[in-house]
Structures are given as C-alpha cells and as structure tokens.
Amino acid sequence: MLINPNGYYESLSGLILPKSTRKPRAFDFFAGCGGFSLGFIQAGYEVVGMNEIAFDPILTYCVNLSKQPLSIYFDDGKRKNEFDTYLKKVIFPKEQKHEYFKQCDIFHKSQILEFPTLPGTGWILSQELSGNVYPPVKNIFIADIKNLTGEFVLGKIGMKRGELDCVMGGPPCQGYSRIGKQDINDPRNELIFEYARMIVELNPRTFVMEEVPDIVNFRTPRGTFVLEEFGMILDEGGYMEFSQFCEAQKFVPRSKRFRKIKPARNMGENERKYNEKTEKNTNQQLLLFAV
C-alpha cells in the first residue's frame, strides 16, 4: 500500500520503506543464532551474508535462515577442518561414515538423522509452507573478524564498496556488562573496533550496533573512552565525522538514550564532561547511525 507520491509504503511489519525494484541488502557481523538477521529479513531486507566464529550458533543460523545452495568461507584451513569434524558429530551422531551436505535432499533419504539440522529445514521452510517466501542467507563467513577485510567480503558476496544498505552487529558485551567482571583488559572488548574497521571498509549506507549501556562509561587500556575511539575510527576512515557520530544519538528515544558524548579534541583526558543522567532500567540499547 503506497502512502505518499514519493513511493514509500508500509511493510507488513509496520516499517515505512521506499518502493524499490530490489530489497535493501544487509550484512550481519557477530551474527550468533541470527536474531538481528531475522528481524531485518522480516522487515523487508535481504541479508546477503553473515559472520560468526562459534559453531553452535552458526549451525542454528543456517538451519533457520539459510538454504542450499550456500557458500561457506573460512579464514584458515584449521578452522575449516574443525568445522568439518563438528558437523559430522552433530548431523550424524549415530553414523559418521556418511558425507554431510552432499545433497540438499539428504534428510529425506537418510533415516539416521536424529533431527533436521540441514540448512533451510527450520524457520525459513516453515514460512514457505505458510506461503511467506523470504530470501535465504547464502554467504556464511566462519572466521575471526580480525582476519576479515572488506575487500574479501565484498568479493565473495559480489558487491562493491558502498553498495550495502546496512551493516549490523552486536560485538561481544561480556567485558562491558555489569553482570560480568567488567575487565578493562578483556580481549573481547577490542572486537568493537574491528567492527568499526569493517564498517569503514564496507562503507554501507547505514549501520546498526547493539551494546549494553555500561559501554558508554567504559575506557580502553589506552585510557580512551570506548565509544569515543569507535567514533574516531569512523572519522579517521572517512565514513562519518566524529561530531556526526555524537549527534546521531539524539535520534535514540529519550527514555532509552545513552549519555550524550561530547566531541573532544584530545581523547583520553579525564576532564571530558558528560551528561550524568542515565537510564537505569535499560539492559540493552540499539544505536542507529546513518550517513
């Protein structure tokens, strides 16, 4: 249903989207079991690829949101071998002599599978049986994000820099969360900066990041505030100005807004002044930025 002369329409999920001959395309980092991807797919996006390093979430993701044929890419041979071994044990727990993923219809021919764990046999199939057809995620990057480059990802998904409509991701929050130890030296804390690097290298039209509220007060071992350093990486990479990064937070709903980040010339100084008002009842927050 068109709602204005410019061609915007209200999707089934309630989002207002521009009318287009193609679906907007997104890529999911730190994809986990696929929560972010599922939401974007239901909102009308085509998720053209995902990246995750843990095997259990990857298998769950593929069962629900992928469909054969699909392409799987690894950052090294050792990880590929480990994943091969993992799949044999999970998919064929009773008999490991069979080749896995050989045929798309292997589930229908084999009686030794304890449950359907092949790509496309989960949520996406249930939707097709209900008459709702969604584009499957066909590019799976099983890799440490530190070993990925924008050039490699774009080459595999067949796109050019700047063509992605959105990059999304929820970098690990264990080191920042008040539920954990909030260890400033937790190596997982640095992965948020790898996410910033990939945003710069992919140059999407928009990006989304999910994190816990305590990250806004968190420092790195270098003495810089985490979100300030994240914003500076985007600035220095030419993706967006640091002031734009700070200004973008004004679009977060007031009741769930992070403390406002004020631009600072010299990162790491203790005299940075912040608005002391925080939202106590919010456990997680989405940040949405657009260039």
Image (cartoon, rainbow, N blue to C red):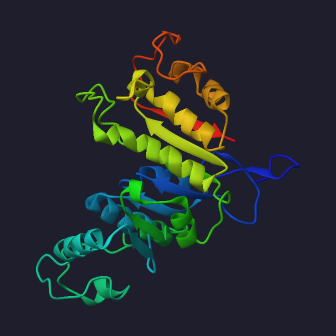
Relative to 230, residue 15 above or below: below
Q: Measured from the top left, where is residue 190 in percent x and y?
A: 38, 40
| 100 and 152: which is toward the camera | 152
- Please tell me which residue is depicted at 34% across the width and 29% down the height of the picture: 221
Residue at the extreme left of the image, as rendered = 94
- Please tell me which residue is depicted at 24% across the width and 87% down the height of the picture: 99
Name the quadrant of the C terminus: top right
Q: Measured from the top left, where is residue 75 in percent x and y?
A: 37, 67
Relative to 250, residue 152 above or below: below
All told, the count of numbered labels is: 0
| 119 and 121: which is toward the camera | 119
Q: Measured from the top left, where is residue 248 in percent x and y?
A: 64, 30
Relative to 117, residue 112 above or below: below
Q: Measured from the top left, where is residue 53 in percent x and y?
A: 33, 58
| 32 and 42: which is toward the camera | 32
| 262 and 99: which is toward the camera | 262
Residue 60 visible in rendering: yes
Residue 120 visible in rendering: no
Q: Quadrant of residue 33?
A: bottom left
- Please tell me which residue is depicted at 46% across the width and 81% down the height of the picture: 69
Residue at the extreme right of the image, as rendered = 5
Name the quadrant of the N terminus: bottom right
Q: Is residue 42 left or right of residue 8?
A: left
Q: Quadrant of residue 175?
A: top left
